[in-house]
Image (cartoon, rainbow, N blue to C red):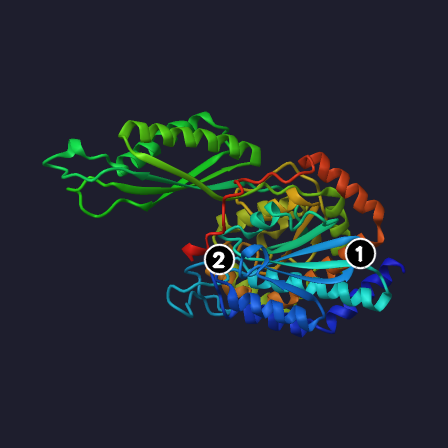
Amino acid sequence: MEMQEKVHLIKEVVEAKREKFARVSDAVWAVPELYFKETQSAAILIQALKEEGFAVEEGVDGIPTAFIGTWGTGKPVIGILGEFDALPGLSQEAACPEHRELVPGGPGHGCGHNALGAGAMAAAVAAKDYMERTGLTGTIRYYGCPAEEAGWGKMFLARDGYFDDLDACYTWHPGIGNMVQSTSSLANMCAFFTFRGRTAHAAAAPHLGRSALDACELMNVGVNYLREHVIPEARIHYAYQDVGGSAPNVVQDHAQLKYFIRAPKITQVKEIGERVKDIARGAALMTGTELEIYFSAGMCDYVPNDALSYLLSEALEAVGGPSFDDADRALAKEFFDSYSASEIEASLKRLSYNYDDWADYRTIPLVEKVGPYKPSDAYGFGSTDVGDASYAAPTAQMNVATYANGTPGHSWQVTAQVGSTITHKALVTVAEAIGLAAILTIERPETVKAAREEYVKETGGKYICPVGMDAKPELEHV
């Protein structure tokens, strides 16, 4: 079958169910849930997969909201990653360019994961429907990945082997352009440092106390000096989880810090983590306190697989960008006109990796054309657990324009637009592009071979877990 015929067929199977895909996205948008609490969101996606003939395994890896939907048999095995968690404090009316909370202080889909989960599901269904029509064989597997924003569900799935048999892994993320991601992301580790001391009267007998709060303070001072002596790309953030109480006349016998450690590569993060541990141990020695260190989770840096990324880009260019209408463009312009010059420049930087004419978009509210894939050594300053999937299997990731150019990430403006018809158009493109990429992967064993060889070369062929086997999802904290 010629490429033009493939594109025609994938568009036909997606068009037949586009309204269903939009309903799934809107249904998840309407019930925004935080990490590891996504019970309603997961149920919506699970039901949709079952209706489409996928066998669904629920509660995967002991995580109640993790699930895997499988259709087909044999090789190759194509994984498609979906997410569905929301963010706190980003409740917002759909399609509204003014800040209007639906629930004061409530969560909202300020990263567009309602669309991410629905779009990935739509792609899995599109590939399945195409295969049923043509008799093509292979396995399509949808991963319902919870807690990307704060719990890092893919790390646990990768650590425990759920991606190991994948020949290719595809995903996407809502964005401001239509392009396959060539940049990496920062690796990240999350750690808790809990100090325990001894209470005493801070005025009458302070010498009898051992201050856990002092230990936290000394640890922070030590880490502050460390910042000069790590690679400049590294970032070390902290927040108090427990300050030991509210009474200054009592020596605090308990206190806790939570740290994030970021760097371009997971190996660098792990090295810095060991140095941070030593500082914490020193703080405990100086204060005579006991210390418990717990690295709870982490994210590997994203490693784009060029073999799969070129294939995904070929599929995206073949199906074309979203078919926006005048109403979509008008809504995007309302948002675009409210953004600052610096917000628009930040968007242009993201576009510059794929679009030669990126500077022309300073005045364009909605990006409609596709930017070709261009390998890059650059990395962003955020982190994503898609990186863990990329260390466990060959992986490619794309963006599709789901909101106006200039829209800042993790904002109420994202929440508003991923509940609009702009996103409905984007879902069609996602389903067509990733669905077609899955089909091309099945038809091209030479690409599967090249992707595996590249994966082994870039990662060593073995997943590097940021934390140990003792780490568990933070279900008790939700």
Label 1 crowding class (10 Å Cα cut-off): few <14, some 14-19, many 20+?
Answer: few
Label 2 crowding class (10 Å Cα cut-off): few <14, some 14-19, many 20+?
Answer: many
In this rendering, does residue 421 appear at all? no
Q: Position of residue 5 (x, y in %)?
A: 86, 63
Q: Position of residue 7 (x, y in %)?
A: 81, 62
Q: Answer yes or no: do the residues labelled 1 and 2 have beta carbons within 8 Å?
A: no
Q: Position of residue 194 (x, y in %)?
A: 35, 40
Disc 2 residue type? Tyr
Residue at 58% from the left image edge and 54% from the top image edge: 61
Using the image, determine if residue 265 lies above or below residue 135: above
In this rendering, does residue 187 appear at all? yes
The quarter of the displayed image where residue 55 is located: bottom right
Disc nearer the start of the sequence (1/2): 2
How far separated are the C-alphas under marks 1 and 2? 33 Å
Secondary structure beneath dot 1 equals loop
Q: Quadrant of the N terminus?
A: bottom right
Using the image, determine if residue 280 lies above or below residue 112: above
Q: Which mark is residue 196?
A: none
Disc 1 residue type? Gly
- Residue topped by disc 2: 35
Using the image, determine if residue 22 lies above or below residue 350: below
- Residue topped by disc 1: 74
Number of labelled discs?
2
Left-right relation of 413 to 306: left
For this orientation, the residue located farthest to the top is: 229
Q: Position of residue 116 (x, y in %)?
A: 60, 60
For this orientation, the residue located farthest to the left is: 204
